[in-house]
Amino acid sequence: MDQETWKLVLEYLAVKEDLSSSKAEIALLEKRLRNWVDEDDDREEQLEAVLLLWQDTAQPPDDGLWKESFAGLREQINQAPVKKFKLLKWWPAATAAAIIGALIFFIAGDKKLLTSKQNQVVWTTKTAAPGKIINVLLPDSSEIWLNSGSSISFPQNLKHAGIRMVKLNGEAFFKVKRDPAHPFVVKSNNIQTRVLGTSFNIRAWKNYRSEVTVLTGKVAVSRDSAGTQSAAVHLLPNQKVTYDTKLALLVRENVEDAKTSTEWRTGKMYFNKTPMEDVFQTISRKYALKVVSDRSFDNCELTAKFDNVSIKEVLRTLELTFDIQYTINKQTIYIKGGRCN
């Protein structure tokens, strides 16, 4: 980013955090930012990086570091207009935070950095009951489909938040409204998914491997463990990333058709070499039933597709495929025997 763009971005951040700023003032700066982004595709990621760093370091640093960074900043700004500067990836987080803070101070003067405003955020949670799939329209007009037993939490002021942060437990399909000035971030289990506008599916069930699959656009997925983020893995359409909990690694791979990851939205179940333990969990969520197995064939894998069929049809398929025996007692399915083919 050049000097003038830095001023624009950070003036926007300062104005956004000031409760005395008018809607017209904020809208004007947002329009200028969108125009700047539209001039070059690479600028979306540049803007996103600054906004996300601001989110994580919204408080000014200690006085000594603040003054030192501010002095260096003024020296850069006073140089020739063609001089460019940027945050380098290898800078320590504290130094980067100090520079951003100094920029805000330099541009905004005595405007208040109302970090207390962030502490007043009111969160809303939507939950899909067992056996149900629900559609959630967020305040920013993004859409979410929640799978059975999943929940999504989002701030009531999401539409006006600098970073559109939501929290997912379970599985959901997202259609995010594009807004370069307000990156969309999904926190789920130990991963964080960042996006500016796209459609993607996230599986983040407790005690299971998390997966992110992209249908359109581009997302960046990173590990987020104990507040420490790893380098992001970027995904394009028909790519997915899986978080290996044992190795603490994000593994990216191509998929033949990303749409299969979202077929649960229409009541379908799609399994492709899926471990039976995962199959039973999916069946349990979809039909709101408990599955009890003697675990004799948990290591078996199932490849099959079920299109809105009854639970008895599903069990009949498993019976023929794995030679199991099953009984249904009220809300519990008991499975015995079974062997891999």
Image (cartoon, grey):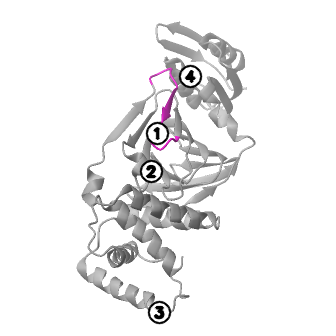
Q: Quadrant of residue 324?
A: top right
How many badges with numbers are in the image? 4
Where does label 4 land, which residue?
Answer: 283
Query: Which mark is on residue 65?
Result: none
Instruction: Using the image as rendered, state which of residue 114 and residue 320 is in the foreground.
Output: 114
How packed mark 4 is, by other alpha carbons closer than 10 Å (few <14, some 14-19, many 20 or more), is: some
Residue identified by numbered label 2: 164
User: Does the magenta segment cover residue 25?
Assistant: no
**Would you say the residues marked 3 and 1 are in contact, meaning their CB atoms lie under 8 Å apart?**
no
Q: Which residues are magenta?
A: 129-142
Q: Would you place residue 215 above or below residue 101 in this image? A: above
* C-alpha distance separating marks 1 and 2: 10 Å
Give the x, y percent position of residue 202: 55, 41
- Alpha carbon separation for disc pair 2 and 3: 36 Å
**Relative height, residue 202 to residue 236 (above, below):** above
> Which residue, given by chain and number where applicable, does mark 3 sit on?
79
Mark closer to the chain start, 4 or 1:
1
- Earlier sequence position, callout 3 versus callout 1: 3
Is disc 1 in contact with disc 2, using a CB cutoff of under 8 Å?
Answer: yes
Tell me the residue that label 1 is attached to: 138
At x 37%, y 46%, the residue is 157
Structural distance between the alpha carbons of marks 3 and 1? 45 Å
Q: Amino acid at mark 4?
A: Ile
